[in-house]
Image (spheres, rainbow, N blue to C red):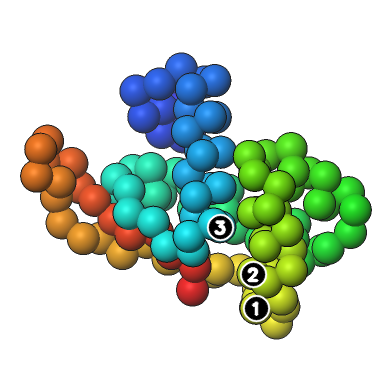
Amino acid sequence: MAKYQKLGRDSSARKALFRAVVTALFDKERIETTEAKAKAVQSIAEEMITLAKRGDLHARRQALAYIYDESVVTKLFNQIAPRYADRNGGYTRVIRTGVRKGDAAPMAILELV
């Protein structure tokens, strides 16, 4: 049994999906996706915010290695991380929104608190 959700993808496709969703989350600050994807990506997003709170060059380079868009990394370090300076975790929330019409997949909103 896997310790993580495979989401019907091989490892490289899953990693690309997670990177894209995390990039979109920090760009838009609120995204709607399936509940499974939201729960899988939530911990990665929290780790990225913790990196940004550290704020040093190594943390920035680690974030750049994961997040696709450099401007999103700048936003993460300059705007998002300072908001959570005095907060220890719990930077994101998952809100269930019902099911998708086409395939009845449970949907959720993943947003920054």
As drawn, the label of residue 83 is 1
Report how far apart the C-alphas of labels 2 and 1 lie in the structure.
6 Å
Q: Position of residue 94 (x, y in %)?
A: 37, 61
The quadrant in which residue 51 appears is: bottom right
Report if the CB atoms under discs 2 and 1 are less than 8 Å apart: yes
What is the secondary structure assignment of the residue under circle 1?
helix
In this view, which residue lies farthest toward the bottom? 86
Neighbours of disc 3 within 10 Å: few (<14), some (14-19), many (20+): many
User: Is 46 left or right of 40, judged from the image as shown?
Assistant: right
The quadrant in which residue 82 appears is: bottom right
As drawn, the label of residue 80 is 2
For the N terminus, the image quarter is top left
Report how far apart the C-alphas of labels 3 and 1 lie in the structure.
13 Å
What is the secondary structure assignment of the residue under circle 3?
helix
Q: Position of residue 108 (x, y in %)?
A: 29, 55
Can you say whether 101 is above or below 86 in the image? above
Amino acid type at image mark 2: Ile
In this view, which residue lies farthest toward the front? 71
What is the secondary structure assignment of the residue under circle 2?
helix
Q: Is residue 97 visible to the viewer in this orientation of the structure?
A: yes
Q: Residue at x 32, y 54 (%)?
A: 32
Q: Earlier in the sequence, mark 3 or mark 1?
A: 3
As drawn, the label of residue 26 is 3
Amino acid type at image mark 3: Phe
Q: Earlier in the sequence, mark 3 or mark 2?
A: 3
Amino acid type at image mark 1: Arg
